[in-house]
Image: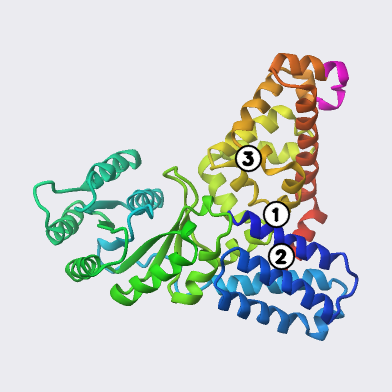
C-alpha cells in the first residue's frame, strides 16, 4: 500500500536529513521531488499543488531552518499536512438513537461492494454489535448467492427475497426483519452498474427515501485512481454521501485516490479494504495512514490487530525475551506464523516504525508470504541448539541445513542476516533511547 510513493518520499527526506542546515534552495529542490512523486502517484494536481505550497510556507520559517534538526522538522510538517488532506468530517460510523441504524451501500459493479458489505458486517460483529445484511442487489446475477455465502462465512444473517424484483420491497422488509431480530445495524447491499446512468441513480434515490439510511456509503475501487474521485463526486451530487469505503488498497501501488478523494469531494473515508480476506477491512484514521505513507509505521493499528490474534501471555513472554536478549529463531518463526493471521506480512511489517529502511535493504520479495515456507524449512532443519544460538552456525552447518531444507547456503545466510536485523531493531525499539527517538520522530 503506497509502496512507490513511500519509497520516493523517504528518499527525499533522507537527503534532507543528511544536511546539517537547510536553505530555501534545499527546501524547494526537495518539494519539487515531493510534487513529482505525488503526481506520479495519481494525486489530483490541485491537491498536490496546495499540499506542497503549505509545506513550503511552514518549512521556510526561520525557526525550522535554524533548528538543530531541520530535516526532522520538515518531516513533521509533512506528516501534519498529509493528515490534513486526508481529514474531512467524521471518519466514524454514526449510530442512530434507535436500532437498527441503516447503512446504504452504493457503488459501480466491480468495486467490491458486496464483499465490502460482508466485511463491514464482520467488523461490526467483532465490535460486539449485531448486524444484518440485506440483499437488495436484484440486478447482478448471483448477487444474492454471493452475499449469502459471505454471510455464512462471517456468521451474519442475510435477508433475501428471490420471489420479487422490487428493490424497495426487499429493502423495507429487510429493515423490518432487522428490527424484529434486534439487530443494531441493517446493511443494505444495492445494485450497481458498469457506469453511472439515470436508472441507477433513480433506483438509489428511491431506496434511500424508502429506508432513510443514517449512513450512505459509496464503495469505490482505489485502483481506478482519479476515476474513483469522479465517481464519488457524481454519486455525492445525486444521492448525498456520508462516507466512502476504498477497496483494493493493497493492490494500488500509487494510492492517489485516497490522497485526493476527500479534498475534492469533501466526503470522508470511513474504511479501507486491504485484501481479499474477510478481516481485511480497516477503520480509516487520517493520522495513522499519513504515518504509514511517510514510513513512520502505525503502531496503534498494529496493536489492535495483535490484540485480535495474540494471546496476552505470549505477548508478555515475547517482550521479556526481547528485553533480555534471549529472542531466538524459534521465537522468530513463531512470530512470523502468528503475523500471518494478521494479514499479508508486508502490510503488517510496514506498520512498524522505521521498518521502511529495513524493508528496502531486505527487498520486498523477501516479505512475500510464499517465502515463509522456505524460512520454516530452514529453521526446522536446524538443531535446537542452533535455533537457540544462531551465532554458532558456521559454513559446514549452513551447508547441512541447506541440504536438509532443500535450499542453498546463501538462503540460510540470508535468513540469519534478516534475523539479526530484526533482533537489533526490536532491541532498539524496547530500549529507553529507542522510545525517545520514536517519540522525537513523531513530533512528541
Residue at label 1?
A: 353
The foreground one among 429 and 35 is 35
User: Mark on residue 442?
Assistant: 2
Is residue 324 depicted above or below 113 in this figure?
above
- Image vertical order of residue 246 relative to residue 381, above or below: below
Q: Which residue is mark 3?
A: 315
- Answer with the quarter of the image where residue 238 lies: bottom left
Q: Earlier in the sequence, mark 2 or mark 1?
A: 1
Disc 3 and disc 1: Cα gap in Å? 18 Å
Residue 294, numbered label: none
Residue 340 image position (x, y, % from top left) = 56, 37
> Which of marks 2 and 3 precedes in the sequence?
3
How many angstroms separate mark 2 from mark 1 (CA)? 10 Å
Q: Nearer the viewer, mark 3 or mark 2?
A: 2
Name the magenta segment's main secondary structure: helix
Q: Residues within 10 Å of mark 3 (few under 14, many from 20)?
A: some
133 sits left or right of 432 in the view: left
Residue 148 location in percent, x, y? 25, 42
Task: Locate residue 123 relative to residue 21 in the image: left or right.
Answer: left
Are circles 3 and 2 on residues that touch, CB within 8 Å? Answer: no
Residue pictured at 32% horizontal, 55% vertical = 109
Q: Residue at x 83, y 17 (%)?
A: 397
Tell me which segment is drawn in magenta: 389-397
Amino acid at each position: 500500500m503506497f509502496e512507490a510513493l513511500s519509497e520516493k518520499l523517504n528518499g527525499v527526506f533522507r537527503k534532507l536529513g543528511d544536511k546539517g542546515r537547510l536553505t530555501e534552495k534545499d527546501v524547494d529542490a526537495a518539494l519539487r521531488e515531493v510534487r513529482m512523486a505525488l503526481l506520479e502517484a495519481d494525486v489530483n494536481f490541485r491537491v498536490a499543488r496546495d499540499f506542497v505550497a503549505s509545506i513550503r510556507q511552514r518549512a521556510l520559517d526561520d525557526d525550522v531552518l535554524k533548528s538543530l534538526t531541520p530535516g526532522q522538522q520538515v518531516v513533521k510538517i509533512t506528516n501534519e499536512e498529509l493528515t490534513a488532506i486526508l481529514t474531512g468530517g467524521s471518519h466514524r460510523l454514526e449510530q442512530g438513537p434507535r436500532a437498527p441504524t441503516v447503512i446504504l451501500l452504493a457503488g459501480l459493479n466491480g468495486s467490491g461492494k458486496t464483499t465490502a458489505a460482508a466485511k463491514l458486517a464482520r467488523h461490526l460483529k467483532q465490535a460486539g454489535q449485531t448486524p444484518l445484511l440485506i440483499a437488495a442487489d436484484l440486478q447482478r446475477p448471483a448477487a444474492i448467492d454471493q452475499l449469502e455465502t459471505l454471510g455464512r462465512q462471517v456468521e451474519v444473517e442475510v435477508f433475501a427475497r428471490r420471489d420479487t424484483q422490487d428493490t424497495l420491497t426487499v429493502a423495507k422488509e429487510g429493515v423490518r426483519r432487522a428490527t424484529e431480530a434486534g439487530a443494531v445495524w441493517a446493511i443494505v447491499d444495492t445494485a450497481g452498474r458498469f457506469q453511472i446512468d439515470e436508472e441507477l441513480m433513480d433506483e438509489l434515490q428511491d431506496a434511500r427515501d424508502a429506508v432513510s439510511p443514517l449512513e450512505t456509503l459509496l464503495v469505490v475501487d482505489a485502483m481506478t485512481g482519479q476515476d474513483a474521485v469522479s465517481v464519488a463526486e457524481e454519486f455525492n451530487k445525486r444521492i448525498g454521501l456520508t462516507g466512502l469505503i476504498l477497496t483494493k488498497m493493497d493492490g494500488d501501488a500509487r494510492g492517489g485516490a485516497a490522497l485526493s478523494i476527500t479534498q475534492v469531494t469533501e466526503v470522508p473515508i470511513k474504511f479501507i479494504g486491504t485484501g481479499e480476506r474477510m478481516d481485511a477491512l480497516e477503520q480509516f484514521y487520517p493520522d495513522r495512514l499519513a504515518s504509514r505513507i511517510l514510513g513512520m509505521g502505525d503502531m496503534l493499528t498494529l496493536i489492535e490487530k495483535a490484540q485480535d490474534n495474540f494471546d496476552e501471555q505470549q505477548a508478555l513472554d515475547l517482550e521479556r525475551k526481547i528485553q533480555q536478549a534471549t529472542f531466538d529463531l524459534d521465537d522468530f518463526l513463531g512470530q512470523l506464523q502468528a503475523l500471518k493471521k494478521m494479514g499479508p506480512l508486508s502490510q503488517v511489517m510496514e506498520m512498524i516504525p522505521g521498518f521502511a529502511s529495513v524493508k528496502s535493504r531486505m527487498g520486498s520479495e523477501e516479505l512475500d508470504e510464499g517465502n515463509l515456507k522456505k524460512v520454516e524449512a530452514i529453521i526446522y532443519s536446524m538443531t535446537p541448539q542452533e535455533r537457540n544460538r544462531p551465532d554458532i552456525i558456521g559454513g559446514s552447518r549452513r551447508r547441512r541445513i541447506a541440504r536438509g531444507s532443500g535450499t542453498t547456503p546463501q538462503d540460510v545466510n540470508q535468513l540469519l542476516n534478516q534475523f539479526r536485523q530484526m533482533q537489533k531493531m526490536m532491541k532498539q525499539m524496547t530500549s529507553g533511547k529507542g522510545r525517545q527517538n520514536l517519540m522525537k520522530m513523531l513530533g512528541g
